[in-house]
Amino acid sequence: MSEAPSPRIASNRTTLIACVALVGVMVGAAYAAVPLYRLFCQLTGFGGTTQ
C-alpha cells in the first residue's frame, strides 16, 4: 500500500525544501543586515560613526 514516492515527487519535494531554505536565509540576512552594518561602521569608522 505505501509505495515509494515517484522520482518526480521526490524532485519536487527537494526543490521545495531548497526554496524554503533559501527564503529563510534571505529573511535572516535581511534581519541581521542593520546590526552587522552598525558593527562594521563602529569598527571601521565608515558611514559617519566613529569610535
Image (cartoon, helix red, strand yellow):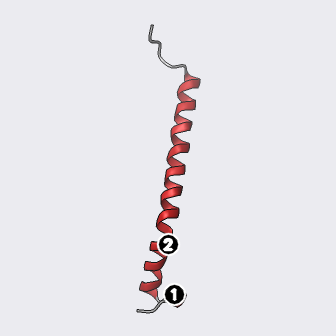
Rendered view: 34 above or below 24: below
Rendered view: 32 above or below 48: above
Q: Earlier in the sequence, mark 1 or mark 2?
A: 2
Q: From the top left corner, tell me how far across and down residue 27 is, in percent.
A: 52, 57
Q: Residue furthest top?
A: 1
For the C terminus, which image quadrant?
bottom left
Residue designated by label 2: 34
Type of residue at label 2? Answer: Val
Tag on residue 31? none
Which residue occupies 51% across, 39% down? 17
Q: From the top left corner, tell me how far across and down residue 29 is, in percent.
A: 50, 62
**Number of numbered markers:** 2
Q: Residues within 10 Å of mark 2 (few under 14, many from 20)?
A: few
For the N terminus, which image quadrant?
top left
Q: From the top left corner, tell me how far across and down residue 21 is, in percent.
A: 49, 46
Residue designated by label 1: 46
Rendered view: 19 above or below 8: below
Type of residue at label 1? Answer: Phe
The mark lying in front, picked from 1 and 2, is 2
Q: Residues within 10 Å of mark 1 (few under 14, many from 20)?
A: few
Which residue occupies 59% across, 24% down? 8
Q: The residue tagged with tag 1: helix, strand or loop? A: helix
Which residue occupies 47% across, 12% down? 3
Q: From the top left corner, tell me how far across and down residue 7 is, in percent.
A: 55, 23
Q: CA distance from mark 1 to mark 2?
A: 14 Å
Q: The residue tagged with tag 2: helix, strand or loop? A: helix
Which residue occupies 52% across, 44% down? 20
Q: In the shown orientation, is residue 19 left or right of residue 1?
A: right
Kindly indicate whether the residue at mark 2 contacts the one at mark 1 (C-beta within 8 angstroms): no
Q: In the shown orientation, is residue 51 left or right of residue 14?
A: left
